[in-house]
Image (cartoon, rainbow, N blue to C red):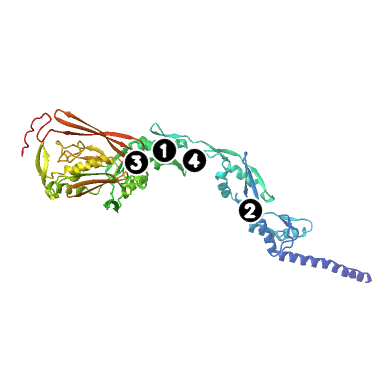
Amino acid sequence: MARHRDQISGWLWVLPSLAIPLVISAVAWTNHVASEGVAIAPNVMFAGVDLSGLTLDVATAHVGWRETAFRETPVTIDLGDRQMTLRAADIGFDYRYTDTINALISARHDETVWREFASWISTPFETVTVPDEYVLDEDLARARLSEDDLILETPTEPSLASEQGQVTVVPGIDGLGVDIDHLIERLKEADIASGPIEVTARLESLPPVVSDADAGVEADEANELTKDGLIAVVNGSSRRLGAAAIRRHLSSDSEDGRMTLSLDLAGFQQDIERLFPGPQGEMEKPLLEVVEGEVQVLQEGVPPPVCCSTESVRAAADDFLSGGEPRFQLETRPNGEERVVRWATGLDVNEVVAEFTTHHACCENRVSNIQTMADAVRGYYLIPGETLSFNDYIGPRTRDKGYLPAGAIRSGHMTDEVGGGVSQFVTTMFNAAFFGGLDLDEYQSHSVYFSRYPFGREATLSMPGPDLVVTNSTGYPVLIWPTYDSTSITVTLYSTKHIDVQELDQRVTFRRQCRHSEIDRQRTYPDGRVVVDTIEANYRPGDGIDCNGNEIPPLRR
């Protein structure tokens, strides 16, 4: 009995010693299980840092810092002759922040109780290292690796050219770039979590997007499209632009894997404008008057339009390339040439360049006719290059226009007719034009000399002829401004003086019984150019007598 009591007494001492560690272990196990999602398990390393026992807030902060550092990790690509370094985030590496935190939370907390218990038991003896969770986004990587800065030699697309009037193909040239599939595989194999990495790219040829064969098809279509040229119409006038001229301005672009045709708009428009040179309409002339010798602009004019507006040419080009009807109405555009704008504003008409006066008796019908014609011509604005026919501008001299019967020469005899005497105005205008430097395109002297005119330097006017036709060959507009009183008529020309006009020698010879006069005029221009022309006149010996001294048959009425 005594020994039995001693055995029982021994167990009573052993059992408590065994129970205490078990209780402690049970409490520790309970705490371990309860800590999941609240704190990191003991002996857990992450990115070289011991996170054992840290609260979840502190641990997630560590993961956030790690994510930032990871995104900035340098990735160097060796391209052979150079290197390029990019950020991990830019090349498609995506840090899985949530997955990494979940991995930290799950460290030593396995799916089954027995495995979790085994991991817990090994805590003092085995460190658990939690890796970074990340992936390579291949679509993002492919997009970045396809950008131009990773192309060593850009491929040259085939293009179209004009050769001997035909559209031909200029072959494309291969470029040199990165084998993107190979490089992505190297990136996936690289341990970017350990720090900066370097990968060597494999290079490959980069073919043009458009093949030479496809370009050849486009060339054939371009030749077919342009074979008949096109017709441009401006203000009712039509001109043809030939196939070769159009093809000269054709170019091509490669877009979305195909070649598209385009036209060099500036060159195309230039060729069209060559078809329609100069003004394509009339200038709206300014309205001027002279007050006490000073020219005043009452209303500015508008320069004549020219071919063609860029908008209408562009629309025609687009329509033509789309296979539209090859006949296009083109709009004019405002004339921006500085000198022409000045002509339209009247700014260059500012001084007297020529003036001439002839005299007559007072108060005769012929004087009324002279003054009526002067009133009709006053204010005529003769722009450079313009020709003025007085018969065309004035028209028939009729009673309805205010003309009266007066002396005139008809078929070699003096007679009366409506409008007689206007030749004095024409002679006065002729002399003003002579000294103003205008071209005297058409004129005829009186058949009999009248002493009121300069000998050999005068002109007559009749319907339908002879006519006085002058052209403004100067570089500035000319304003014709006649004035008169009861015994004289004066024609003043206003412009910008820039031509020196001199009357040279006069030669008078006899052609049978008629006297023939030749007067030389010298015009000296600002560029040093000198032009000499000759004014001629022929006078019969008397009224009704020809150059042979014979009487001219009487005028039949």
The residue to which callout 1 is attached is 218
Identify the element where label 2 is drawn: helix
Identify the element where label 4 is drawn: loop
In this rendered view, identify the residue nearer to me: 135 or 47: 47
Quarter holding the C terminus is: top left
The residue to which callout 3 is attached is 273
**Looking at the image, is mark 3 or mark 4 earlier in the sequence?**
4
| Mark 3: amino acid | Glu
The residue to which callout 2 is attached is 71
Q: Residue 115 location in percent, x, y?
A: 72, 58
Assess disc 3: are there few (<14), some (14-19) or many (≥20) residues with their C-alpha within 10 Å of its C-alpha.
some
Give the CA separation, mark 1 to mark 3.
28 Å
State if disc 2 and disc 1 touch (CB < 8 Å).
no
Which residue is found at the position 30% from the left and 34% from the top?
531
Between tags 3 and 4, which lies in front?
3
| Mark 2: amino acid | Arg
Q: Is residue 359 left or right of residue 238?
A: left
In this rendered view, identify the residue nearer to me: 115 or 367: 367
**Looking at the image, is mark 1 or mark 2 earlier in the sequence?**
2
Question: Is 399 rendered above or below residue 224?
Answer: below
Assess disc 1: are there few (<14), some (14-19) or many (≥20) residues with their C-alpha within 10 Å of its C-alpha.
many
Give the CA separation, mark 3 to mark 4.
36 Å
| Mark 1: amino acid | Glu
**Looking at the image, is mark 4 or mark 1 earlier in the sequence?**
4
**Looking at the image, is mark 3 or mark 2 earlier in the sequence?**
2
Identify the element where label 1 is drawn: helix
The residue to which callout 4 is attached is 209
Residue 106's quadrant in the figure? bottom right
Q: Residue 354 location in percent, x, y?
A: 27, 43
